[in-house]
Image (cartoon, grey):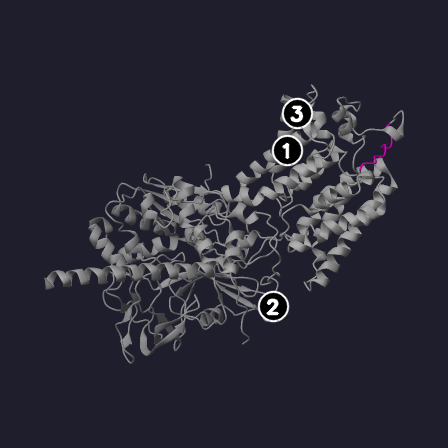
């Protein structure tokens, strides 16, 4: 009789895989992507396609060059490309999406060892790189379909308005995404639907998004800026929803410990407030998350969970 | 009634539908077949044979024993001739010295078998001695000698005796069938245990995916004040000793300590029946119930076998493997924690609770990918460990980091590997490193003890010389 397979335990595995998780993230981003295309037109769609295609291509090329197995079928590069596109203004030229994807995949991800090894969120790394290198292309905002403005050439996004100390946009428009901003960040409702889907699928836990968004809301509600206390407007405008639900929850660059996730989310919320209020940029979401990404190893070291049956703490013998 | 449970854990598909409606069927070894009795079927000192090649043995005859307290004797489960004493493969994968008995098919019993006693007239020491002399060990899987468990140090009072009827391993249904078919014997066994610890209350913990078993046990316990049936949430590893204790009493057994330190004794249902048989029927441990399941076996079910039968004989007796979809993987025990077998020529031992015959589909091993740090292993580890980190230490060979981050507290339940979307072999790598590090720890302790003894001997010699 033939010999039998010998393997380690357990012999049953859950159905979930990296691919199924990434697929769920893509599904969760569909409403926001659709809203972006609806408001900003065909160029938004072109940028999304360009970013995804180039992210996948750069991942495959990188892995080939480094003589590693090509793992684009796990869909993680698709997620990176899509998230990068969400962070681009709809008027940006196509090469911006391609350069951003290249930076995100090569420097944000593959050089550190690929999936799971990146210490910062690759899509945010790409965005930060683009913002520093091509500030004009990255801050030329188009007016969304259906929004009537006096002069499209001088249209300011809600964040720029808030920075200047006023706000024209009303709350309903902010929620629906009828306001200026990057392709994927404007429609808060669509992003929240995606977040609920991810929670339902157990892809993310509620801690990081809820605590992050709540921290931002509380700081702007209690302290405010320029004498304005508009917590709801502040979390609907700009990238708080997109960042909190889809960026800060990136597995590789956020803490795995429950307590660590709380610290991470509060920290990112505080930094977002500080940059928006006192910084040079109108937006602080991406930098706040990138800064907290760098603190993750430290946070995890101090937030290791207490084990079941832990012995009472004794002073370590030296 | 409210169901109780522990924190974290996983929900694997239970697979119990294959065997749960199959009543326990008695399978006797064929005349002329060889039965193997390994000298170590328990935790503790291995036994030494009491018989020699050529001897004739009878059913119920003690054929191996050890002088150590932490050990358990072994009994012939058939009559026949001792034909050999040689190493034989056991389900854990080791070759263990075994007595080989050729079954003469007569089932001649030794004198005095079946002389049961009324436990209420026995002293506690007599009961403990009778349990020890019947070779009873924990039948749930670990094989901890029951007389040792029932006799904890005097300074640890016992207030709970818990019957582990969670049967949280998927596929296994032998405990479930026992609860449906012989509930009153479980209750009597528990009453014997409670006689030893009169201040304790007995609690039978059953997962709530077995409502029939809960009803059956509740009926059998009617009118007995010190025994209750406690439904538990269906979740793996609910049947882990530490987690069962936590679910029912909310006490945590401290790292490295035994259940008795939390005032609890935990025994599996089949073990309790073995106690009842030992005392009331005067029969030592010679049989056990095995669930044979999986899609690769023709007749999945629950079988009462004579301990010592080879699994090959068991499989042949119950109709064999499916021809069109033959199994490619054999598992001794449940699919979460049971070791695989590379052959059917394995002796069944006291702790063999199941034999799973997995087909190609069931045995599929997914490819390992990069850890994506999703943290699902941390979210589900019942011990509160960080398995992905322990896995990294294991790969790097960093034993120090592994121990510092509580790798030795891992109970090897496999919840982390089950959940891992990257399909990493977390439990396997942790188990391997645990073995190395536990070995180092034991060696260091032994070296320290030796150095201390030598220093004392030297000091003593010097003192005498003066």
Q: Label 3 marks which chain's residue?
A: A
Picture quadrant where residue B371 is located: bottom right
Bin the neighbour count of mark 1 within 10 Å (Cα to Cα): few under 14, some 14-19, many 20 and up: many
Q: Residue A194 — which label?
A: none
Q: Position of residue B331 (x, y in %)?
A: 50, 64
Camera-nearest label, 3 or 1: 1
Stretch in magenta: A139-147
Q: Main secondary structure of the magenta part?
A: loop
Subunit of label 1: A
> Could you tell me residue B282's position as x and y percent?
27, 59
Q: Residues within 10 Å of mark 3 (few under 14, many from 20)?
A: many
Q: Identify the secondary structure beneath mark 3.
A: helix
Q: CA distance from mark 2 to mark 3?
A: 65 Å
Q: Secondary structure under badge 2? A: loop
- Marker disc for residue A220: 3
Q: Nearer the viewer, residue B340 or B163?
A: B340
Q: Which residue is mark 1?
A: A271
Report, in whole angstroms, how far the alpha carbon at label 1 lies from the one at label 2: 60 Å
Marks 2/3 in contact by CB < 8 Å: the verdict is: no
Q: Is residue B40 above or below residue A161?
A: below
Which residue is painted at 71% across and 49% down in the image?
A: A23
In the picture, the disc for residue B325 is: 2
**Of B418 and A35, which appears nearest the observer?**
A35
> Of marks 3 and 1, which one's residue comes earlier in the chain?
3
Q: Are marks 3 and 1 in contact (CB under 8 Å)?
A: no
Kindly tell me whether residue A199 is visible in this rendering: no
Q: At 54% from the left edge and 76% from the top edge, which residue is drawn? A: A1
């Amino acid at each position: 009789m033939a010999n039998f397979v010998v393997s380690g335990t357990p012999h049953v595995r859950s159905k979930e895989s990296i691919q199924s998780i990434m697929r769920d993230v893509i599904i969760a981003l569909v409403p926001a992507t659709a809203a972006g295309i609806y408001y900003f037109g065909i160029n938004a769609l072109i940028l999304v396609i360009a970013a995804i295609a180039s992210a996948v291509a750069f991942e495959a090329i990188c892995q080939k060059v480094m003589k590693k197995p090509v793992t684009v079928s796990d869909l993680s590069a698709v997620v990176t490309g899509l998230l990068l596109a969400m962070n681009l203004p709809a008027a940006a030229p196509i090469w911006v999406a391609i350069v951003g994807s290249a930076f995100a995949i090569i420097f944000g991800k593959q050089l550190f060892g690929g999936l799971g090894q990146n210490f910062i969120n690759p899509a945010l790394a790409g965005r930060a790189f683009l913002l520093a290198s091509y500030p004009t292309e990255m801050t030329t905002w188009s007016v969304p379909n259906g929004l009537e403005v006096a002069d499209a050439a001088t249209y300011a996004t809600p964040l720029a308005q808030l920075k200047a100390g006023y706000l024209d946009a009303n709350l309903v428009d902010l929620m629906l995404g009828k306001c200026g901003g990057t392709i994927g960040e404007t429609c808060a409702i669509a992003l929240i639907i995606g977040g609920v889907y991810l929670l339902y699928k157990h892809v993310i836990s509620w801690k990081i998004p809820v605590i992050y968004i709540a921290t931002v809301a509380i700081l702007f509600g209690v302290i405010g800026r320029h004498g304005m206390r508009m917590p709801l407007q502040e979390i609907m405008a700009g990238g708080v929803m997109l960042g909190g639900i889809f960026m800060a929850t990136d597995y590789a660059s956020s803490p795995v410990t429950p307590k660590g996730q709380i610290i991470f989310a509060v920290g990112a919320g505080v930094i977002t407030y500080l940059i928006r209020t006192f910084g040079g940029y109108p937006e602080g979401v991406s930098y706040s998350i990138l800064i907290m990404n760098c603190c993750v190893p430290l946070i995890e070291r101090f937030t290791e969970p207490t084990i079941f049956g832990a012995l009472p703490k004794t002073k370590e013998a030296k | 009634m409210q169901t109780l449970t522990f924190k974290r854990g996983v929900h694997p598909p239970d697979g119990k539908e294959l065997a749960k409606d199959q009543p326990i069927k008695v399978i006797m070894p064929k005349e002329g077949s060889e039965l193997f009795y390994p000298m170590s079927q328990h935790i503790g000192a291995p036994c030494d044979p009491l018989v020699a090649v050529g001897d004739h043995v009878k059913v119920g005859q003690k054929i191996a024993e050890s002088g150590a307290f932490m050990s358990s004797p072994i009994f012939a489960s058939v009559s026949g001739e001792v034909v050999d004493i040689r190493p034989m493969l056991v389900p854990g994968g080791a070759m263990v010295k075994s007595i080989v008995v050729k079954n003469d098919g007569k089932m001649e019993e030794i004198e005095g078998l079946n002389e049961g006693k009324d436990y209420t007239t026995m002293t506690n020491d007599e009961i403990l001695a009778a349990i020890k002399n019947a070779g009873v060990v924990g039948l749930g899987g670990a094989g901890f000698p029951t007389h040792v468990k029932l006799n904890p140090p005097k300074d640890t009072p016992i207030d709970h005796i818990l019957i582990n009827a969670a049967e949280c391993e998927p596929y296994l249904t032998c405990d479930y069938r026992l609860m449906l078919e012989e509930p009153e014997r479980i209750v009597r066994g528990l009453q014997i245990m409670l006689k030893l610890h009169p201040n304790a209350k007995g609690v039978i913990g059953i997962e709530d995916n077995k409502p029939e078993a809960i009803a059956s046990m509740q009926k059998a316990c009617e009118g007995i004040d010190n025994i209750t049936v406690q439904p538990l949430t269906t979740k793996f590893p609910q049947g882990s000793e530490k987690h069962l204790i936590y679910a029912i009493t909310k006490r945590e057994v401290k790292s490295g300590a035994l259940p008795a330190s939390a005032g609890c004794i935990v025994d599996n249902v089949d073990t309790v029946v073995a106690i009842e048989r030992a005392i009331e029927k005067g029969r030592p441990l010679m049989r056990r119930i095995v669930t044979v399941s999986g899609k690769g076996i023709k007749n999945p079910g629950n079988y009462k076998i004579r301990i010592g039968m080879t699994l090959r004989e068991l499989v042949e007796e119950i109709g064999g493997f499916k021809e069109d979809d033959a199994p490619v993987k054999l598992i001794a025990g449940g699919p979460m924690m049971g070791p695989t077998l590379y052959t059917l020529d394995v002796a069944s031992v006291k702790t063999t609770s199941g034999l799973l015959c997995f087909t190609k589909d069931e045995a599929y091993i997914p490819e390992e990918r990069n850890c994506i740090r999703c943290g699902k292993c941390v979210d589900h580890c019942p011990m509160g460990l960080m398995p992905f980190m322990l896995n990294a230490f294991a790969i790097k060979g960093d034993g120090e980091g592994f121990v510092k981050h509580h790798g030795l507290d891992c109970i090897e339940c496999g919840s982390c590997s089950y959940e891992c979307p990257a399909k990493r072999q977390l439990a396997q790598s942790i188990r391997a490193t645990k073995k190395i590090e536990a070995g180092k720890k034991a060696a260091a302790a032994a070296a320290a003890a030796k150095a201390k003894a030598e220093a004392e001997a030297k000091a003593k010699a010097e003192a005498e010389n003066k």
